[in-house]
Amino acid sequence: MNPKRWLTLLPALLLGVSSLLVARPADRDEDKPPALGATADLSQAPRVGVDRPKPTYMLHERDKRVHGLKPFQDLVDAAPAGSTLRPPPGNYSGPVVMRKPLVIEGGGQVTIDSGDRGTVFSLQTDGAVLRGLHLTGSGDSHDTDDSCLDVRGHRNVVENLVIDNCLFGIDLKQSSDSVVRGNKVRSKPRELGVRGDGLRLWYSDRNLIEGNEVADSRDMVAWYSSDNIFRNNVGMRSRYSIHFMFANNNVVEGNRFYDNAVGVYFMYTEGGVMRNNLISHATGASGMAIGFKEASNALVEDNEIIYCAVGIGSDLSPFQPDSKIWVRRNRFAFNGIAVKLTSELGGNVVTDNVFEGNLTNVVQAGRGKSGLNEWRGNFWDDYQGFDRNHDGVGDTPYELYAYADQIWIEMPPARFFKTAPVMELLDFLERLAPFSSPELTLKDGKPLFRKPELQKGRVTG
């Protein structure tokens, strides 16, 4: 065939091949059954061991403080399955491995110490209860995830434990339908990046994490873990208060997070609710109260976010087509940037919030455009309009333009000079007689004229 004829047919051939490559199975064969496993129910799938084998340490390798202590393992081995074990008050040596359901009541007077080696307590059964124990003295190896408590079963209760001098605190892997309540967790005194996680969930669903205090650890994480509830916890002086990754439909409510680098971060998630939380002093170069990274369909409501570098930081979120992120009835006060949208694609619905005392209320960075999000009924402390009919709504829309702010928005190192006199003067001159076209960041058509009251952690009219 003539070579020129091949060149004219080449685009059609490539189009046909590409359509075959992207065609769905149903497009190719209507009668073909679904792919193997496409409709499988994984809720009853057997547990697969994923832990690296724990090393065995001789007594002389452990700290001398545990020499001469009675092994707690002896009490566990002697207790019949399904019974309640109330050990005499005192100090015992670890490690402990429990493979049968027991109720262990420590009454706050029982300490199990592993002498700074390995994992202190490994719970490898379903339906057990650990209550009122003091677990301490794990090893410091990240390779073997040395922790105070490994939970490897379902429907367990871990309650009122004191956990300290441990690399990892409470580590749940493939452990669902459990309750972790009223525990106090602290890591080893290490640099922030090499501490262990105070609480970790990995492929663990439908757990209740309630009333715990996690301080001076690295992170509280939930990876590949869905439908969990984090309620009324306190997190202090750590890196991430909670870090979700590939974790869907988790609920975070009534928590208090102080002095952490990041409050709550939703990464590659779908669904999720965050309500009635207090997050303060998330400061530093990466300080952020709430973060989204390619997340979709999240609800953020009735939270108080104060004294943070960034209140909400959103990167490519919402991510899924036609999805939303709802931000409503929150208070953003005295933050560096209240809401920062970076390379976002629209879909944020921001309503009935209070913005007061922030250095910058909203930053729109990246390739985003102002009209892609919905802003309605928010209170802005820098609103310059009137309310002549006294209906509580401003007579004119609230419009936020970026003037000289574009310098530090587009060049992050310039943020250091954000409030310097020269930048303030430049911004004043820009507003007085713009020598470049300012960018419209947002338009709120119905701004509240009076600040709503904050009652019981909720912003109300």
Image (cartoon, helix red, strand yellow):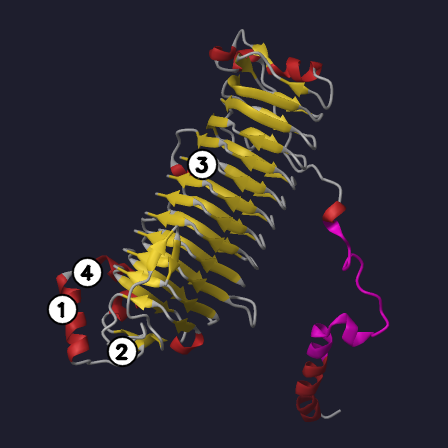
Disc sitting over residue 425 in the figure: 1
Task: Give the mark nearest the N terminus, 4 or 1.
Answer: 4
Tell me the magenta residue range: 17-42
Q: Amino acid at mark 3?
A: Val
Identify the residue shown where x is 44% and y is 52%: 276
**Dot 3: few (<14), some (14–19), or many (≥20) neighbours within 10 Å?**
many
Closer to the camera in the image, 87 or 434: 87
* Left or right: 249, with 411 as reference point: right
Task: Give the mark nearest the N terminus, 2 or 4.
Answer: 4
Residue 437 higher or lower than 359, as above or below: below
Disc sitting over residue 403 in the figure: none
Disc sitting over residue 419 in the figure: 4
**Disc 1/disc 2 C-alpha distance (Å):** 16 Å
Residue matched to label 3: 214
**Disc 4/disc 1 C-alpha distance (Å):** 10 Å
Based on the picture, tell me whether residue 16 belongs to the magenta stretch. no
Residue 343 visible? The answer is: no
Task: Give the mark nearest the N terminus, 3 or 4.
Answer: 3
Q: Amino acid at mark 1?
A: Leu
* Left or right: 267, with 445 as reference point: right
**Disc 3/disc 4 C-alpha distance (Å):** 35 Å
Badge 3 vs badge 2, beta-carbon distance below 8 Å: no
Q: Residue furthest front?
A: 390
Q: Amino acid at mark 2?
A: Pro
